[in-house]
Image: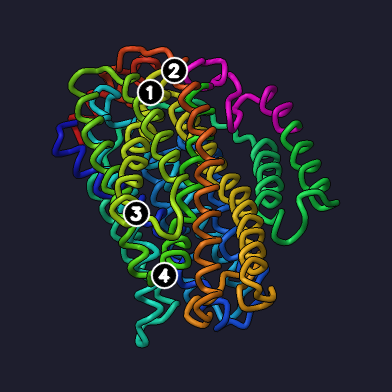
Amino acid sequence: MTNRQILQAMSGLMAGMFVAILAGTVVANALPTIIADLGASQSSYTWVVTAELLAMTATVPLWGKLSDLFDKKLLLQLSLGMFVVGSLLAGLSQGVELLIFSRVVQGIGAGGLTALAQVVMAAIIPPRRLGKYAGIFGAVFAIGTVAGPLVGGVLVDTSWLGWRWCFFIGVPFALLAIALLQRTLRLPAVARREVKIDFLGAFLIVAGVCALLIWVTLAGNEFDWASWQTAALTGAGALLLVAAVFVESRTAEPVIPLGIFRNRTVALTTVASLLVGVAMFGGTVFLSQYFQVSLGKSPTVAGLMSLPMIFGLLVSSTVAGQVISRTGVWKRYLVAGAVVMSVGLGLLSTIDADTSFTLLSVYMAVLGIGVGMLMQNLVLAAQNDVPAGELGAATSVLSFFRSMGGTIGTSVLGAILASRVAAEMTKGFDAAGIPAGGDGGGESSVPDMSTLPEPVRNIVEHAYGVATADLFLVATPCALLALLTVVFIKEKPLKTTSGMERLAEESGTAKDTDKTVVGG
């Protein structure tokens, strides 16, 4: 494919990717209004967030395996269709039960988009050229991450729109993506063997992962970390995953081929992706709260304050991708990215309520630069080192573990944040001679800063500043472990043929495939 054909095909992929990212971020600032309007409880608040994340994370490996067996273009359009259905149901919800169900449907669709967009990119673009287009992927990721909370806040604050448009707004993008994919994405037909889907393995993987994700999401909030609920969920999750490994090792078409973990590159990039998820998502997800509570900014301004980190991610992923495509050398950027990410997290661990925005911007930009060099190039390294028939499985495994790491990091660091805030506020109240009570909020709620008297507000701002810095300090060792992991990845020359070409060569049908490409 020419550069023009690749860019045309990527237009639909990136529109779909933007939809997936938007689904997870647009409700961030709108949830308090949504829950209040539907008359739901605090536990429902948690489940509206968790349902989409669980469904997306748990189904990524299944979508990846399906992409190795069925038409990738059709699967992409199916996942977009599921997203549209889920979005419409969410926007029309009159009760929280339907809203939670619709978020599950949205999450399943978003899981398909997350896995399949990168699989299709690997199928149509040779690894040697793939880095050139990684910047576009990074840009879409960055824009979706920043625009989501910002757009959500604006929609909620606009009287003639309201929170329902937080869900409706993704529908036009999804429909556009379906149309663009139909028009621009041309994948050559490749002969397939008889398909056998491992439904039992898929069920065991999804059930086991969901049990563990529910545990890390709710522990520390809905129940104690040391409780019977923890024992039940972790025990059930472990048993289900052990059963999944047993089934996957004996079935003809496993959802996650266990043999790919014998590949050193895949195993190491998987571990690194998990650690990057913990460090990046677990740390940065609380920055918006820090901006609003500790620095006293509005939701809209808080969204804009993340731009230095996003700009750093965009620039580094674009520049590194271009250089990798030109030189074919990639490991040095993985190592450099892990080093810079560790430095960025370390710098952010020094912030407090009095940190200037200029200094904060520099710290966030450093973190963004590190993540930009590391995140997408881990996928590139894995895709370059697996057979074409396992591209979908390998790509989805990395996406799965990165999402898993983000979920674990968000939950565990959120519990640490709540504990540190409560401890710092208690210490501050005692020092000031103020009786601890409802004025300062607490572990279970974020205080409304505009209603607090000056002395209490200062204590709360300080508490959130100190606690947020501690989160980055806890996340820094994860980044250092990611650095240690990528150091052991062996650099191999980037292949110059796309996934579809390699698959044709492996199946002995290269000539037929070439004719199909020429014919459109």
Find the residue positioned furthest to the bottom: 160
Sequence-wise first label, 1 or 2: 1
- Does the stretch in magenta take in 77? no
How many residues crowd mark 3 within 10 Å: few (<14), some (14–19), many (20+)? Answer: many
- Rendered image: mark on residue 487: 2
Residue 19 appears in the picture as rendered: yes
Tag 1 and tag 2, C-beta contact below 8 Å: yes
Q: What is the C-alpha distance between the residues marked 3 and 2?
A: 32 Å
Tag 2 and tag 4, C-beta contact below 8 Å: no
Q: What is the C-alpha distance between the residues marked 2 and 4?
A: 41 Å
- Rendered image: mark on residue 18: 3
Q: What is the C-alpha distance between the residues marked 1 and 2?
A: 6 Å
| Element class at badge 2 | helix
Tag 3 and tag 2, C-beta contact below 8 Å: no
Comparing labels 3 and 2, the label whose residue is closer to the camera? 2
State the predominant SS element of the stretch in magenta.
helix
Sequence-wise first label, 3 or 2: 3
Q: Callout 2, which amino acid?
A: Val
Q: What is the C-alpha distance between the residues marked 1 and 4?
A: 37 Å
Residue displayed at 20% across by 18% down: 327
Q: Callout 3, which amino acid?
A: Phe
